[in-house]
Image: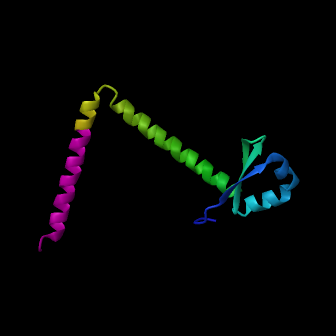
């Protein structure tokens, strides 16, 4: 159900047990995500298989991002914050200058 946000509903564990078939069917449809509580404390969630797949994809994407930041950090471990900021400012200026040159070439008459 892409594009449709499921509603999150809190349900007591005892109620989820009594209405298990209904809870599962509503979660399967993507209509509702359930937070199961025991004595007022959230202990579990019941979601569609699609939500689990999306969560796994997000976890993998997050791990890739962590790896990129780790590699980036290693590359600059011997530099001060000021040196890193200066290098970033220089890189941004270079990209902006290149973008201006490209725009000027596109606007120039042939």
* Residue 100 image point, x, y percent: 18, 59
Query: What residue sits 56% from the left and 49% below the top?
Result: 58
* Residue 61 image point, x, y percent: 52, 47
Outermost residue on the top side: it is: 78
* Main SS class of the magenta portion in the image: helix
When the figure is inspected, residue 28 is found, relative to residue 82, above or below; the finding is: below
Please name whichever residue, 106 or 21, is drawn nearer the observer in this view of the structure: 21
Outermost residue on the bottom side: it is: 110
Outermost residue on the front side: it is: 40
Please name whichever residue, 47 or 32, is drawn nearer the observer in this view of the structure: 32
When the figure is inspected, residue 45 is found, relative to residue 5, above or below; the finding is: above
* Residue 74 image point, x, y percent: 38, 30
Query: What residue sits 18% from the left and 68% below the top?
Result: 106
- Image-quadrant location for residue 84: top left
99 within the magenta span? yes
35 within the magenta span? no
| Residue stretch rendered in magenta on the structure | 87-110
Outermost residue on the right side: it is: 18
What number of labels is visible? 0
* Residue 78 image point, x, y percent: 31, 25
- Image-quadrant location for residue 42: top right
Which quadrant is home to the N terminus?
bottom right
Query: What residue sits 23% from the left and 51% below the top?
Result: 95
Which quadrant is home to the C terminus?
bottom left
Query: What residue sits 26% from the left and 36% below the top?
Result: 85
Q: In the displayed structure, does residue 37 sit left or right of residue 106?
A: right
When the figure is inspected, residue 106 is found, relative to residue 67, above or below; the finding is: below
Q: In the displayed structure, does residue 57 sit left or right of residue 30?
A: left
């Amino acid at each position: 159900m892409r594009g449709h946000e499921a509603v999150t509903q809190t349900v007591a564990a005892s109620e989820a047990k009594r209405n298990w078939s209904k809870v599962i069917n509503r979660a399967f449809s993507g209509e509702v995500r359930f937070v199961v509580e025991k004595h007022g404390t959230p202990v579990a969630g019941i979601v569609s298989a699609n939500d689990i797949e999306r969560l796994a994809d997000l976890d993998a994407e997050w791990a890739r991002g962590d790896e990129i930041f780790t590699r980036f950090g290693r590359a600059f471990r011997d530099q001060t914050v000021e040196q890193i900021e200066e290098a970033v400012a220089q890189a941004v200026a270079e990209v902006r200058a290149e973008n201006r040159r490209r725009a000027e070439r596109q606007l120039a008459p042939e």
